[in-house]
Amino acid sequence: MPITNITANLPAGPAAGFRQIGTEPITQAPSGFADMLKSAIADVNQKQNQSDSATAALAQGKPIDLHEVMIASQKATITLQAALEIRNKAVEAYQEIMRMQV
Amino acid sequence: MTMFHSMNISSSALTAQRLRMDVISSNMANAESTRGKLVNGEWQPYKRKMVVMQPREAAFSHVLKSAMSGVPSAGNGVKVTRIAEDDAPFKLVFDPEHPDANEEGYVQMPNVDPLKEMVDLISTTRSYEANVTVLNSSKAMLMKALEIGK
């Protein structure tokens, strides 16, 4: 895949793009790398939001089980770790390419 | 999401065990309650309660997907379908001063056996711990997967 395609598929402003990711669920199957990245980031964001709302509900004294709060935070941790690993791999690959002698 | 399927199953088990714990607490607290329910103008003592669990049914879309892809489903965890009452006979205690004593001076006491409740309590605690262990192993497995290629 040409590298230009990645930037072409991304939304214009990064802030606008992220808000859009958080609100609307991604329904169609991811096609390119950009879509896959988008859906992965959306998932990470969703898990973080779920963890936040569960913690807030517990703090406010709403009827929520303690284990559900803990599990939500664990899920958020795991998805974030996975996202970090993927970012590291992507950056590593990019740097490897940039080090190439031409 | 399939990545956290085992976690969701364990979560449902933890919820079920918490409810079981609540029911045991209620039984223990009401071990001496002589006025549980009013039947035909007569007070009946508290009846011991117990939870009935059953595997949680998958949604139709999940069943269809698993049938079409040929990948068997691991189930969807557990749920408490109802809280049943124990129909064992009440204990009769001789206590003529008690307000709920009958003409012969006997009081009907709940059919709660504290010893049995203690055994259930230990079973519930251990079950909860076991499910937490499953959850932790599930997390450890996922974190190990992230270490692939390091």
Image (spheres, coloured by chain):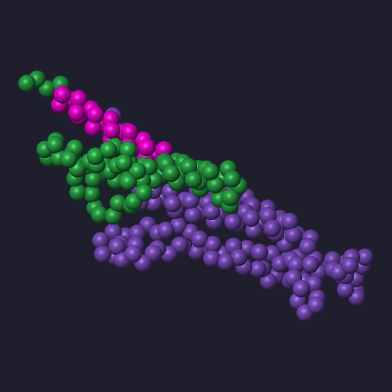
Of the chain colours in the picture, the one used for chain A is green
Of the chain colours in the picture, the one used for chain B is purple
Tell me which residue sits at (65%, 68%) in the image: B85
* A93 to the left or right of A48: left
* Residue A84 in the image: above or below residue B13: above
* Residue B52 in the image: above or below residue A90: below
For the question of whether residue A75 can be seen, the reply is: no
Residue B143, horizontal then vertical, whole percent: 37, 37
Residue A11, horizontal then vertical, whole percent: 24, 42
* Residue B10 in the image: above or below residue B81: above
Q: In which image quadrant can residue B115 be found? A: bottom right
Q: In which image quadrant can residue A8 be found? A: top left
For the question of whether residue A83 can be seen, the reply is: yes
Residue A101, horizontal then vertical, whole percent: 9, 20
In the image, which residues are magenta? A77-98
Main secondary-structure element of the magenta-colored stretch: helix
